[in-house]
Image (spheres, rainbow, N blue to C red):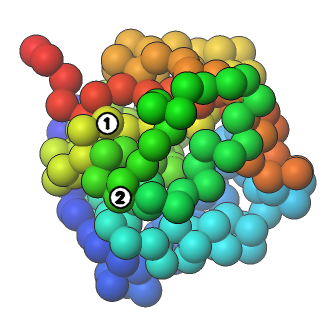
């Protein structure tokens, strides 16, 4: 299945914020039953605003017949990033050194239920990465999501696990994953 994909930058956030928030609530709360303060829409909106305030934030939204099917967004890791600060497993300093151009963080990727299992997440992911100049991409995934199936999808996409981290006091422990932005065919 192919969806229409549109690219956005931080200045576009007011135009797309509600679509992102509505999709987040539908998928995270209703479909996956993720509740509690960390998953509240207000907290998610705070994180969205924080991410979008950083240099290099971009997003893609997918549409079918004008209806939002999903989104993904992320931002480059700045030299003073705190991305690597909460690692629970040691990682060599050369892996975590950032210059603002080396690594992009995929902060969120969400696809609505009707479009799951149809390669839409992959399409959004690759469309988003196609406009990124960084050499590598990192993300956090809850290894319990889908009884490990979500992490397995990222592994199939070429990501490898670096370790674990707990970025917020009320967040789950996440697997930290990394891959090259451009994959060899």
The correct choice, above or below, for 134 with respect to 1 in the image is below
| Secondary structure of the residue carrying numbered label 1 | strand
Task: Say few, some or many: other residues with alpha carbon within 10 Å of mark 1 (under 14 / 14 to 19 / 20 or more).
Answer: many
> Residue 40 in the image: x percent, y percent?
78, 63
Q: How many numbered marks are there?
A: 2
Mark 2 element type = loop
Q: Is residue 184 above or below residue 39?
A: above
The residue at the point 31 percent across, 46 percent down is 102
Q: Name the residue under label 2.
A: 100
Mark toward the viewer: 1 or 2: 2
Question: Above or below — where is 88 with respect to 80?
Answer: above
Residue 159 in picture, x, y percent from top left = 41, 21
Q: Mark 1 points at which residue?
A: 136
Are circles 1 and 2 on residues that touch, CB within 8 Å?
no
Check the image and report above or below for 80 versus 170: below
What is the crowding at mark 2: few (fewer than 14 residues within 10 Å), some, or many (at least 20)?
some
Question: Is residue 8 shown left or right of residue 185?
Answer: right
Describe residue 105's horizontal placement relative to residue 88 as left or right. Answer: left
User: Going from the N terminus, do you reach mark 1 or mark 2 first?
Assistant: 2
User: In this orientation, does residue 16 appear?
Assistant: no
Residue with the most extreme front position: 93
Image point (53%, 33%), residue name: 93
In the rendered image, residue 20, in percent from the top left (x then y), is placed at: 50, 66
Q: In which quarter of the image is residue 154?
A: top left
């Amino acid at each position: 299945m192919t969806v229409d994909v549109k690219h956005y930058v931080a200045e576009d956030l007011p135009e797309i914020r509600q679509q992102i928030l509505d999709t987040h609530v539908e998928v995270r709360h209703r479909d996956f039953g993720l509740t509690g303060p960390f998953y509240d829409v207000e907290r998610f909106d705070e994180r969205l605003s924080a991410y979008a305030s950083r240099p290099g934030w971009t997003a893609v939204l997918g549409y079918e017949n004008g209806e939002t099917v999903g989104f993904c967004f992320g931002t480059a890791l700045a030299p003073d990033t705190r991305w690597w600060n909460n690692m629970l497993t040691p990682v060599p300093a050369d892996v975590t050194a950032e210059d603002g151009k080396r690594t992009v963080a995929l902060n969120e990727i969400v696809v609505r239920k009707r479009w799951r299992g149809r390669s839409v997440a992959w399409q959004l992911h690759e469309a988003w990465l196609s406009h990124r100049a960084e050499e590598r991409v990192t993300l956090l995934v809850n290894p319990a999501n889908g009884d490990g199936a979500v992490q397995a999808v990222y592994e199939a996409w070429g990501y490898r696990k670096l370790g674990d981290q707990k970025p917020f006091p009320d967040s789950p422990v996440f697997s930290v994953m990394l891959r090259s932005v451009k994959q060899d065919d």
